[in-house]
Each structure stands twice: as C-alpha cells, then as structure tokens.
Image: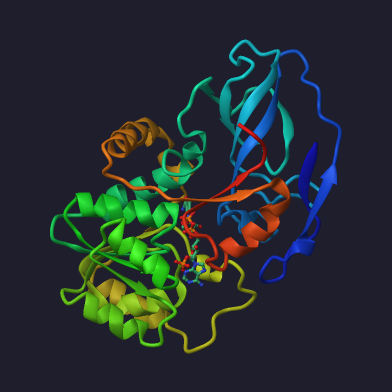
C-alpha cells in the first residue's frame, strides 16, 4: 500500500521534496466499513492551498499526513450494507492505493461505469464549478462576449462551451499554440489567445471589439490586467480561481491598482462575486448532473483528459499543473480498473 504524504510546506512553487512516498500495511475494514482500492486520483489547483497553512476556507493537510484528493475506487471488501464488492465509488481517499471508509461522503457508482474518471472532471467538481459560476453569476445572454482563461482545463473548457450553447461570443485564453488550436478547432470557441504572447493585451482588445460582458476569472494576474479596461457596463465576473498567484510569496510588483479597480467597479457597475463550489451550490448538484450528462451524451460538450500513469508520478504532475503543463483534466491512474 503506497501513499504520498506532505513532507514539508512549499515556499513558492512546490518541489518534489515537499512530498514523500511511503509504504504502509493495507488497512482492514471493521464492521460498517469498506476497503477501497484507488483507481483514479484527481489532481486539482486547490491542493496548492491545502499544502499551505495560511488561513483559507478549508483546513490544511497536516505534515506527514496523506495528501487529500477526490478519487474513484473499487470496493475490495465490504462490511457496509450500502456498498458491494466490485462497485465503483467516488470518494475522497487521497493520494494512496488503499483506504478504509465508514461510507461518509462515498457515492456508489455501481459495477459498470463507462468512463469512471469523468466523475472527477466534467461530471463532477470541475464541471459543476463551470456550470454554476457561469450560469448563476455570469448569467450569459445571446450575443454577449465572454472571456475565459485556463480555457482547455476542465473548468475553462466547460465554461466556454456552455457559453457557446447560450450563443455568446467566446474568447479563450490559454498557454501556447497547441492549446489555442484545440480551443478553436475542438471546443468551438470564436478565438483563443496565448497569454504568453508579448502583445497579449493588444490581441485581447482586438479580439473583443464590443468589449467584454463576462470575464470568468480562473487565473488573475496579467490576464485580469488586460481584461479590466475592456469590461462593459454591467459586466459580470465570477471569481472562480486565481491560479497565477497560487505559488506567489509576495504581492505582484508594479503600481497599486486597487483604486483603478474600484473606480471601474463603480463606473461600470461591475458584479464581481467569488464562490466556493460545494459551500455555495451543493443544493444544485442534481440539476447540474442531469444537464451535463445530457449535453455529453448529445456530443454538445467535448471533454479532454490528461492522464498520468502511476501514483509515484502524482507529485511531478501536480507541480506541472501549476505551470500549465497539463492539457485537459489532470487525472492519475493509480491502478488497474
Ligand atoms: P486546469 O486544468 O485548467 O489547470 C490549471 C491551468 O491554469 C493550467 O493548465 C494553465 O493553463 C493555467 N495557468 C497556470 N498558471 C497560470 C498563469 N500564471 N497564468 C495564466 N494561466 C495559468 O485547472 P481547473 O480547470 O481544474 O481549474 C481552473 C481554475 O478554477 C483554477 O483557478 C481553480 O483553482 C479554480 N477552481 C475553483 C473552484 C471553486 O470552487 N471556486 C473549484 C474548482 C476549480 P494554460 O497553460 O492554458 O495557461
């Protein structure tokens, strides 16, 4: 039973030394418990926050504790009435091969699931995040212009595709030409810009001749700087994530732009609203699950996974996620189906 624990807290970008691979005995399920074997492990940007002990909306991972994560597992042995040996289950088993659970927070998916890992992405937390942030805060209307960055990841790609279904003009932002081509050719966005380009701000202004009505905020930093002057009156900004700053150890250099931001909020009557998906929207989950399944089945939503083989490769893959090395929803295949 291998498991990856938090060895030390990162200062800036995480390094392999912040993680440690350990061996532990396979736990035994007691009465009312199940033994689970992890098959897929989800790697997500929020985990950077859990590695840090700075105050946040969720408690940090303790030093020497197993890194937490959403997982899809098989039930190996069950002494719990609701779970059957061989079933797939969605849970929070963390970065390890085996775990024991009393069933809290476990969702049984049954014995046959066509794409078990999808519940970690498009049919799970990131898809739900895209759906609620866009529809409840972004409130897209036909003909409006939407900008979304990290636009080939599970949140951004889904936001842009739902906005296209709502007849918006969608401008994606991604790192590099290959991701940008994918956004236009596969996801159907109207245009996609590379945030690493020298004249990114100028390109964004050109791509948004009618301004920006919705900016779905995933990254912050220089993408937000380029967006701010283009925002239209009554623009909406669902603040979903600020990944460009997750590894920051100090304020970004440059002049203080708070006064400019607040003046723009006032004069453009902006709606800027942050949200934490399950804290704010848990009661809407069924509605999301129904719509998203129907859209996927109908081919209206495309979904790309970036699969990494082997638990031992999780730390490097996670480090890469914060540098844009993933291309699609990052999932680790920990063991055989
Ligand atoms: P992604 O799979 O899209 O991975 C993150 C991507 O962010 C990278 O691939 C990279 O894409 C981009 N990125 C990384 N660093 C930078 C940078 N400095 N500047 C610009 N882009 C950068 O992640 P998700 O789809 O899972 O998550 C997207 C966002 O949503 C994150 O901010 C995450 O924290 C947030 N989130 C928020 C939730 C909530 O409840 N509020 C729930 C789930 C996610 P590229 O190479 O294209 O730049």
Residue 107 lies in quadrant: top right
Q: Residue at x 34, y 46 (%)?
A: 131
Can I make out residue 215 in this image?
no
Q: Position of residue 235 (x, y in %)?
A: 24, 65
Residue extending furthest toward the left: 143
Q: Nearer the viewer, residue 123 or 231?
A: 123
Q: Nearer the viewer, residue 86 or 216?
A: 86
Vertical arrangement, residue 48 with respect to residue 176, above or below: above
Can I make out residue 192 in this image?
yes
Q: Position of residue 212 (x, y in %)?
A: 23, 70
Give the position of the N terminus as an image quadrant. top right
Give the position of the C terminus as an image quadrant. top right
Vertical arrangement, residue 130 with respect to residue 73, above or below: below
Q: Nearer the viewer, residue 258 or 203?
A: 203
Is residue 144 left or right of 70 when viewed as pictured? left
Is residue 162 left or right of 321 when viewed as pictured? left
């Amino acid at each position: 039973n291998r498991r990856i624990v938090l060895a030390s807290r990162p200062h800036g970008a995480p390094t392999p030394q912040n993680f440690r691979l350990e061996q532990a005995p396979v736990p035994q399920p007691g009465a009312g418990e199940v033994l689970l074997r992890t098959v897929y492990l989800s790697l997500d940007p929020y985990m950077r926050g859990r590695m840090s002990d700075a105050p946040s909306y969720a408690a940090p991972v303790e030093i020497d504790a197993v890194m937490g994560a959403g997982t899809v597992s098989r039930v190996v042995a069950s002494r719990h009435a609701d779970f059957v040996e061989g079933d797939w289950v969605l849970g929070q088993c963390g970065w390890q091969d085996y775990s024991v659970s009393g069933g809290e927070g476990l969702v049984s998916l049954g014995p046959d699931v066509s794409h078990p890992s999808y519940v970690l992405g498009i049919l799970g937390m990131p898809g739900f995040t895209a759906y609620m942030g866009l529809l409840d805060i972004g409130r897209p209307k036909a003909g409006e212009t939407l900008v979304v960055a990290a636009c080939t990841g599970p949140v951004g790609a889904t936001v842009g595709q739902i906005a296209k279904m709502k007849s918006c003009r969608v401008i994606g932002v991604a790192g590099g030409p290959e991701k940008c081509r994918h956004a236009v050719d596969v996801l159907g966005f109207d245009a996609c810009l590379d945030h690493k380009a020298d004249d990114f701000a100028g390109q964004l202004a050109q791509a948004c001749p009618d301004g920006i009505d919705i900016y779905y905020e995933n990254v912050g930093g220089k993408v937000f700087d380029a967006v701010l002057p283009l925002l239209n009156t009554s623009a909406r900004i669902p603040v979903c994530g600020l990944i460009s700053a997750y590894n920051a150890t100090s304020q970004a250099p440059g002049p203080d732009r708070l006064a400019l931001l607040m003046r723009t909020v006032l004069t453009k009557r902006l709606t800027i609203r942050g949200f934490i998906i399950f804290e704010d929207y848990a009661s809407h989950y069924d509605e999301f699950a129904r719509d998203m399944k129907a859209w996927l089945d109908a081919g209206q939503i495309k979904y790309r996974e970036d699969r990494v083989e082997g638990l031992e490769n999780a730390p490097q893959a996670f480090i890469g996620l914060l540098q844009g090395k993933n291309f699609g929803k990052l999932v680790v295949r920990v063991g055989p189906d």
